[in-house]
Image: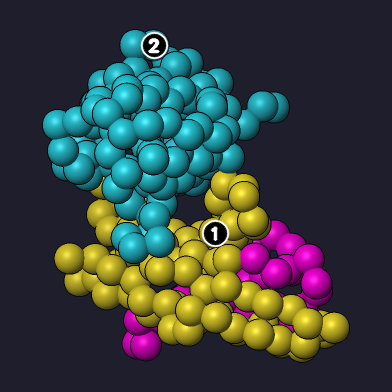
Chain colours: A cyan, B yellow
């Protein structure tokens, strides 16, 4: 089975530009998570969805960040405008609620804002 | 608030030696505990998890971990290290694992494991 698929894998953008990261969760999973990994803050949860509905966005750093899940097989994380401090690896992850909190991670989107 | 502390940001062992990666948690209620591994430029892969069943948990690649409530610890071990085990390892916790806490992992800072010949 295909795992969690993220795109792009790598992106370099200029400060002020809009960035859109995409995620396709594992088919049949009803939870989707966005995590961010930085050297300074480690791995932190940004937002998560259950059955396409955002449940907790308390980890979203500021209004420049937004996430959507229009259907069960697609989610986006958008940053507008981007800033150099947004440079990080962004992981999408998904889970089946019957799996006892087993979370499957994608390969990550490596974002550099210059 | 829940948290995990990984003791030692870097651990170095010889091939064939015991691997011991330390993790302590803080939680006022029984937690779910996890170990993940991250190879360079890759995502996180679940090694094993504790969900209040057996205290000794066996995972993939020969790793295991023991939940010790009295010590609030969940250390990861492997009897004999392989070169392929070189990676970064993360301990994580979920408290109140149902409802609105489902999947809300709080990660430790990670331990980089180096295996030398």
Left or right relative to B78: residue A89 = left
Residue B41 image position (x, y, % from top left): 62, 50
The answer to if B35 sits in the magenta stretch is: no
Left or right relative to B58: residue A76 = left
Residue of label 1: B36
Q: Which mark identifies residue A14?
A: none
The residue closer to the viewer here, B104 or A22, is: A22
Q: Quadrant of residue A26?
A: top right
Q: Is B23 above or below relative to B36?
A: below
Callout 1: few (<14), some (14-19), or many (20+) C-alpha neighbours within 10 Å? some
**Chain holding disc 2:** A
Quadrant including the N terminus of chain B: bottom left
Residue B112 visible somewhere in the drawing:
yes
The residue closer to the viewer here, A38 or A45, is: A38
Residue B77 image position (x, y, % from top left): 63, 79
The answer to the question of whether label 1 and label 2 lie on touching residues, with beta carbons closer than 8 A, is no
Determine the residue positioned at 24% across, 66% down.
B2
Callout 2: few (<14), some (14-19), or many (20+) C-alpha neighbours within 10 Å? few
Determine the residue positioned at 63% across, 75% down.
B113
Residue of label 2: A71
Left or right relative to B45: residue A30 = left
Residue B109 image position (x, y, % from top left): 40, 69
Q: Is B103 above or below relative to A52?
A: below
Determine the residue positioned at 44% across, 17% down.
A74
Span shown in magenta: B59-87
Quadrant including the C terminus of chain B: bottom right
Q: CA distance from mark 1 to mark 2?
A: 28 Å
Helix, strand or loop at mark 2: strand
Left or right relative to A23: residue B11 = right
**Chain holding disc 1:** B
The residue closer to the viewer here, B104 or B28, is: B104
């Amino acid at each position: 089975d295909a795992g969690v698929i993220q795109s792009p894998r790598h992106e370099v953008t200029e400060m002020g530009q809009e960035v859109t990261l995409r995620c396709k969760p594992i088919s049949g999973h009803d939870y989707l998570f966005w995590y961010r990994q930085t050297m300074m803050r480690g791995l932190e949860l940004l937002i998560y969805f259950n059955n396409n509905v955002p449940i907790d966005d308390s980890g979203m750093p500021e209004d420049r960040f937004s996430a959507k899940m229009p259907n069960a097989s697609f989610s986006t994380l958008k940053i507008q405008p981007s800033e150099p401090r947004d440079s990080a690896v962004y992981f999408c992850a998904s889970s089946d609620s019957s799996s006892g909190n087993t979370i499957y991670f994608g390969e990550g989107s490596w974002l550099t804002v210059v | 608030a829940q948290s995990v502390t990984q003791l030692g940001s870097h651990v170095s062992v010889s091939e064939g030696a015991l691997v011991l990666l330390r993790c302590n948690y803080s939680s006022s209620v029984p937690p779910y505990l996890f170990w993940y591994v991250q190879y360079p430029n890759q995502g996180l892969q679940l090694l094993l998890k504790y969900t209040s069943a057996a205290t000794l948990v066996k995972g993939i690649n020969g790793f295991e971990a023991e939940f010790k409530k009295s010590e609030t610890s969940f250390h990861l071990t492997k009897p004999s290290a392989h070169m392929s085990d070189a990676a970064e390892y993360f301990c994580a916790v979920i408290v109140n694992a149902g409802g609105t806490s489902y999947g809300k992992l709080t990660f430790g800072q990670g331990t980089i494991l180096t295996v030398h010949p």
